[in-house]
Image (cartoon, helix red, strand yellow):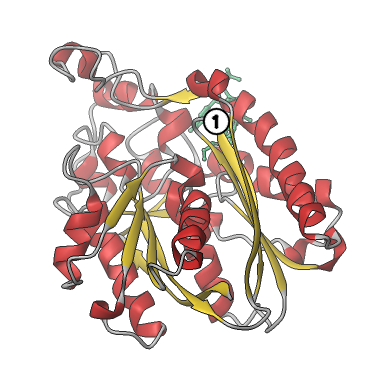
């Protein structure tokens, strides 16, 4: 008995924002963003839209694709670092929105590795025999981090107002991070099935000595109250990232995790049909591909269209590979991710 992904779906935020739109409200350019990250556009949620809503859209589509009814789902794992509320988590919001039974919903974070960690948990739940049909969702709404009250209306095309020079200067302070991220959701239904297809092996890692490399200083329960006007003023509610450090870790630890998961399962890296890499930067994705010695067509990407959607990149990418017919029955597929924590790892899956 294996844990098989029987349906996938995506939930995209409504506004498509081009690099040029961002260049209107901060000192950046299409050329910089494309050449450093590969990103050309991303989706931003409409005001009032949340990650629970995007996750629910993706989940509905995944449940339908699996040929199930919402009431067939036995457990939910919702991975997000950008929930609608600090409490409760997105799990109960999705449960109510989709009319699921009063089943357990698990809210996890794990940032860019959220979907990968969720796959491992889903496998454990399914293999226990207690939850035969698990819904796994990865959804993020990064726009809440962005100081877009200084030009939000302009960037999503709801106004033609040009930002002032002072607003532009303030938006530029966070440009090294804000241009990289987008909103979105992906979901997968994971079911117990007889046969050779399914999740073969997962390897997950944590190194908390790197916690400060990608973190958010403000909105911390170590301060009273947990968020203060001074923190907002100081930009501490926007995550900080040591970009080069994360980059270096990503291009070494992800290929190593893929090699290790293949070796643990007794399969050769060359026999992989697809390697789905967390979509953070096209240069990282190409670095992983080269480190593994695989041809570019085995390492597909969609970062150019969505930017980095954190827990949502892997399920959106897998869904698009299925839709494009890139996934053949019996094909070996590796999923790999690395992000804040640091958390990283890889999963090996037979389609
Ligand atoms: O999913 C979570 C994990 N996150 C990642 O995997 C991200 C990993 N890191 C990266 O992808 C890259 O390090 C970045 C894309 C974040 C940055 O690329 P980089 O090649 O390391 O650029 P840099 O930080 O060295 O910046 C180069 C220059 C700087 O100017 P100076 O100091 O050389 O004059 C920046 O101020 O580019 C400037 N810069 C920008 N210019 C225009 C930074 N952001 C921007 C921007 N537009 N948006």
The image position of residue 167, as x and y in percent, is: 25, 25
Relative height, residue 132 to residue 155 (above, below): below
State the count of labels. Answer: 1
Residue 22, x across and y down, in percent? 38, 42
In front of the other: 300 or 168: 300
User: Can residue 345 be seen at all in this image of the molecule?
Assistant: yes
Which residue reaches farthest front? 129
Q: Nearer the viewer, residue 168 or 71?
A: 71
Q: Secondary structure at mark 1?
A: loop
Does residue 26 sit above or below 11 in this rendering?
above
Ligand 1's quadrant: top right
Q: Quadrant of residue 181?
A: top left
Horizontal relation, residue 227 to residue 328: left or right? left
Q: Is residue 81 above or below residue 226?
A: below
- Residue at point 15%, 12% (across, down): 224
Quadrant assignment for the N terminus: bottom right
Residue lying at 24% horizontally and 33% vertically, measured from the top left: 163
Image coordinates for residue 270, horizontal then vertical, percent: 86, 63
Q: Can you identify the residue that label 1 sits on? A: 342
Q: Does the numbered disc 1 mark a residue whose Cβ is under 8 Å from ligand 1?
A: no
Image position, residue 217 (x, y; %): 34, 18
For residue 305, say whether it is visible.
no
What residue sits 74% from the left and 36% below the top?
252
CA neighbours of label 1 inside 10 A, class few (<14), some (14 to 19), many (20+): many
Quick check: 255 left or right of 229? right
User: Quarter of the image holding residue 347?
Assistant: bottom right
Q: Is residue 35 left or right of residue 323?
A: right
């Amino acid at each position: 008995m294996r844990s098989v992904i029987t349906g996938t779906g995506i939930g995209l935020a409504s506004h498509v924002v081009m690099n040029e739109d961002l260049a209107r409200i901060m000192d950046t350019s299409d050329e910089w963003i494309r050449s450093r990250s590969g990103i050309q556009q991303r989706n931003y949620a409409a005001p009032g839209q949340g990650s629970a809503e995007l996750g629910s859209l993706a989940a509905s589509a995944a449940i339908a694709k699996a040929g199930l009814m919402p009431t067939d789902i036995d457990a939910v794992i919702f991975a997000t670092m950008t929930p609608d509320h600090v409490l409760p988590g997105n799990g109960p919001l999705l449960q109510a929105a989709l009319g699921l039974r009063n089943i357990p919903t698990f809210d996890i974070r794990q940032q860019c590795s959220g979907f990968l960690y969720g796959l491992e948990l889903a496998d454990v739940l399914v293999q226990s025999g207690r939850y035969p049909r698990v819904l796994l969702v990865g959804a993020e709404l990064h726009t809440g981090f962005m100081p877009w009250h200084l030009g939000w209306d302009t960037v999503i095309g709801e106004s033609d107002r040009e930002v002032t020079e002072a607003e532009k200067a303030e938006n530029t302070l966070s440009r090294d991070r804000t241009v990289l991220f987008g909103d979105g959701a992906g979901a997968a239904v994971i079911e117990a099935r007889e046969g050779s297809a399914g999740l073969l092996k997962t390897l997950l890692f944590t190194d908390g000595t790197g916690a400060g490399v990608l973190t958010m200083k403000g909105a911390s329960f170590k301060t009273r109250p947990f968020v203060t006007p001074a923190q907002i003023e100081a930009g501490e509610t926007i995550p900080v990232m040591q970009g080069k450090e994360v980059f270096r870790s990503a291009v070494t630890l992800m290929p190593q995790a893929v090699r290790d998961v293949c070796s643990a399962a007794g399969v050769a890296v060359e026999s992989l049909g697809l390697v789905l890499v967390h979509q953070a930067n096209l240069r990282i994705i190409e670095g992983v591909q080269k480190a593994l010695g695989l041809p570019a067509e085995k390492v597909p990407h969609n970062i150019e269209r969505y930017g980095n959607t954190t827990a949502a990149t892997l399920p959106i990418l897998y869904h698009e590979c299925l839709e494009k017919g890139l996934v053949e029955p019996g094909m070996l597929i590796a999923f790999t991710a690395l992000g804040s924590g640091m958390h990283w790892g890889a999963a090996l899956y037979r389609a």
